[in-house]
Amino acid sequence: MDDDRRFALESRLTNNGCYLESIAVADDAYEVTYQSVAAGQHGEIPHQQVGDVVNVFRTLFDEHDWAVRSVEATVKTLDDEVLGSWRADADWFAALADGDLTEVEFSRRVVASLEE
């Protein structure tokens, strides 16, 4: 991933209390690892923040010409402790954009993918 795209993601994540540790494109997915201030404070991955991160990717897909791919995220505390992971599949993003999936159903799928 080029520096401009990394910066675009990193700056948006920082606005949501997340600090990008790594981003890679592999097997048609964005593999992202980030540290979460809120996750460390609560000892779990906050669902609202997951939604915020998903919306960052939706904005990058819609407004900045990023290819729509699955997002596979690993969430850490500021002490670098892995709290868990979540994912949002590319076909979910496509179905949401096409109106074949509601916001509620999309969110339910993402939350159901949480592994802590």
Image: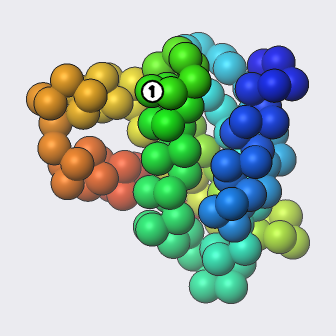
Residue closest to the far front: 63
Residue closest to the far left: 100
Please provide percent x and percent y for residue 72.
56, 37
Residue matched to label 1: 62
Tell which of 78 and 116 is nearer to you: 78
Q: Is residue 71 visible?
A: no
Q: Would you identify the image quadrant in which residue 92 lies?
A: top left
Which type of secondary structure does the marked residue at label 1 adopt? helix
Left or right: where 87 falls relative to 97:
right
Q: Would you identify the image quadrant in which residue 8 lies?
A: top right
Judge the density around disc 1: few (<14), some (14-19), many (≥20) Cα neighbours within 10 Å. few
Q: Residue at x 16, y 44 (%)?
A: 102
Please provide percent x and percent y for residue 30.
61, 28
Q: Is residue 114 above or below residue 27?
A: below
Q: Is residue 38 above or below residue 110?
A: below
Please provide percent x and percent y for residue 35.
76, 60
Left or right: where 10 falls relative to 115:
right
The colour mode here is rainbow
Left or right: where 62 falls relative to 18:
left
Q: Is residue 103 visible?
A: yes
Tell which of 43 and 5 is nearer to you: 5
Q: Residue at x 69, y 60 (%)?
A: 15
Tell which of 101 and 108 is nearer to you: 101
Quarter of the figure with the N terminus: top right
Q: Residue at x 54, y 44 (%)?
A: 56
Please provide percent x and percent y for residue 94.
30, 23
Q: Would you identify the image quadrant in which residue 47 lies?
A: bottom left
Quarter of the figure with the C terminus: bottom right
Q: Amino acid at mark 1?
A: Asp
Q: How many marks?
A: 1
Residue closest to the far bottom: 41
Q: Residue at x 76, y 44 (%)?
A: 10
